[in-house]
Amino acid sequence: MFRWKNSSQTEQEHNEAALREAKIKELKTLLGELSGRNSLYCSDACLKRYLEARNWNVGKAKKMLEETLKWRSTFKPEEIRWDEVSGEGETGKVYKAGFHDRHGRTVLILRPGLQNTKSLDKQMKHLVYLIENAILNLPEDQEQMSWLIDFTNWSMSTSVPIKSARETINILQNHYPERLAVAFLYNPPRLFEAFWKIVKYFMDAKTFVKVKFVYPKNQESVELMSSFFDEDNLPTEFGGKALLQYNYEEFSKQMNQDDVKTANFWGLVHSNNNQLHASNGFSGGAEISPEPNQTNP
């Protein structure tokens, strides 16, 4: 009986894998022929993430992906460079950590209490830049990142406006599906509860379950953090032993180096005057980032 059960489970898993592979091919066919950056963006792994985000409904995944391609054609996240958003990064309100979680995922540290600007457009551009950078630096066997949100010095007066929070959630869950593994809200003050009651309604079910409230005096929270992070790497602000140090100058150097990697990945030339143009077979001008092919719904 035990062997029969294992054999049955193996066959079922094989069938499910075959079905999912077929759906990836179906989605690829429905999207039609893509060119330029859209072709590079829509890898099989990408299609899989969009299908997972829509519970493997091909039609819904196609619609979601086409909306992302339209967004990317106007927002152009792959063209954002550090010198365009460096002013947003002066305080270290959002930055890529110098360590990974236990699963090898890139970690973004967010410190909303250090908000230093009021421009929603610039804030979103900065966040998207760092999400793209986090993805760029993922290990080959990993597709997701972890967020650590530090509420030190957070207050209603320094909190992110509802509009900003809503746009952040919109971008993350609609244009970077299955990129977030978990977001830890570490020791949020009681005042945050009122803010959270509004913000949570902007989240879909898949994003909502990834948000974890953790408190330093709660044993379950301590164990949860320990299951995701080595305490020797984890900053003291999150219950670990490491010192949280953000050096703006050093981080800027790192981002400038990564900008070259980004340009190379997307087939762009990164020059000293920060002008970008196509290379490696990409055509120039607007054709680099075309609108997604229009197909029948």
Image (tube, helix red, strand yellow):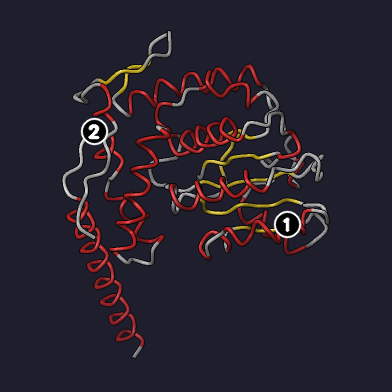
Q: Name the residue tied to disc 1.
A: 214
In front of the other: 286 or 82:
286
Pick out the residue farthest to the bottom. Answer: 1
In front of the other: 296 or 254:
296
Q: Mark 1 is on which residue type? A: Val
Badge 1 density bin: few <14, some 14–19, many ≥20, Cα 10 Å? many
Query: In the rendered view, would you say 17 is above or below 265?
Result: below
Dot 1 lies on which element?
strand
Q: Which residue sits at x=24%, y=63%? A: 23
Query: In the rendered view, would you say 16 is above or below 40?
Result: below
Residue 278 left/right relative to 186: left
Q: Name the residue tied to disc 2.
A: 36
Q: Position of residue 201 (x, y in %)?
A: 61, 62
Which corner quadrant holds the C terminus? bottom left
Q: Mark 2 is on which residue type? A: Gly
Q: Quadrant of residue 293?
A: top left
Q: Which residue sits at x=37%, y=46%? A: 68
Residue 238 left/right relative to 278: right
Query: In the rendered view, would you say 187 is above or below 126?
Result: below
Q: Position of residue 154 (x, y in %)?
A: 79, 42
Residue 158 left/right relative to 230: right
Residue 246 left/right relative to 283: right
Which corner quadrant holds the N terminus? bottom left
Badge 2 density bin: few <14, some 14–19, many ≥20, Cα 10 Å? some
